[in-house]
Amino acid sequence: MISATSCNRTSADKKAIARDTRIGCRLDNPVLEGFVVVNYVTDLERCPNPPGNQTVYTAMIIESYEDKPIGARMDICNGQEVPKGWVAVGPSQGAVACPREPGDSTVGPTRFIIQRVN
């Protein structure tokens, strides 16, 4: 589980974040039901490459969307289905997340924004 550390957060906030955010391996684990991918990171200790694979971003950070209130927005990595009860709002221009693998020449945002509607 990912630690929840940030300035100005109460211990209850940190526990809620830790409960709702997890890390998993991209290559062999599907995204858990009720979660979306919000970033890709390198974690070769927990998520090593199989022989012959040179993936740099071997882990995915996933976050629960089920507990978010109506109107909430989330930035999620491209290539995912929009969850039921949510709509795609548009591309995310925020901070760098969901990096492309080296050699991927695709241009444009790597994330998009979804919003809960019901």
Image: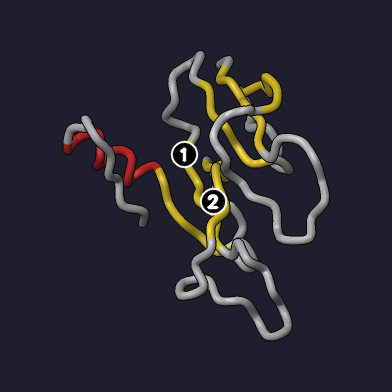
The residues bearing labels 2 and 1 have C-alpha atoms spaced at a distance of: 9 Å
Q: Residue 63 placed where, x, y %?
A: 47, 42
In the displayed structure, does residue 84 sit left or right of residue 63? right
Give residue 108's position: percent from left, percent from top: 76, 36
**Which residue is nearer to you in this view: 35 or 62?**
62
The disc labelled 2 sits on which kind of residue? Leu
Disc number placed over residue 64 in the picture, else none:
1
**Where, quadrant-wise, is the C terminus in this rendering?**
top right
Considering the image in quadrants, where does the N terminus appear?
bottom left
Q: Which residue is mark 2?
A: 32
Q: Is residue 104 left or right of residue 78?
A: right
Q: Determine crowd level at label 2: few under 14, some 14-19, many 20+ residues with C-alpha closer than 10 A.
A: few
Note whether 15 is above or below 43 in the view shown: above
Residue 48 at what x, y percent from top left?
55, 76
Q: Residue furthest bottom?
A: 51
Question: Image point 33% across, 40% down: which residue?
Answer: 17
What colouring method underlies this structural image?
secondary structure
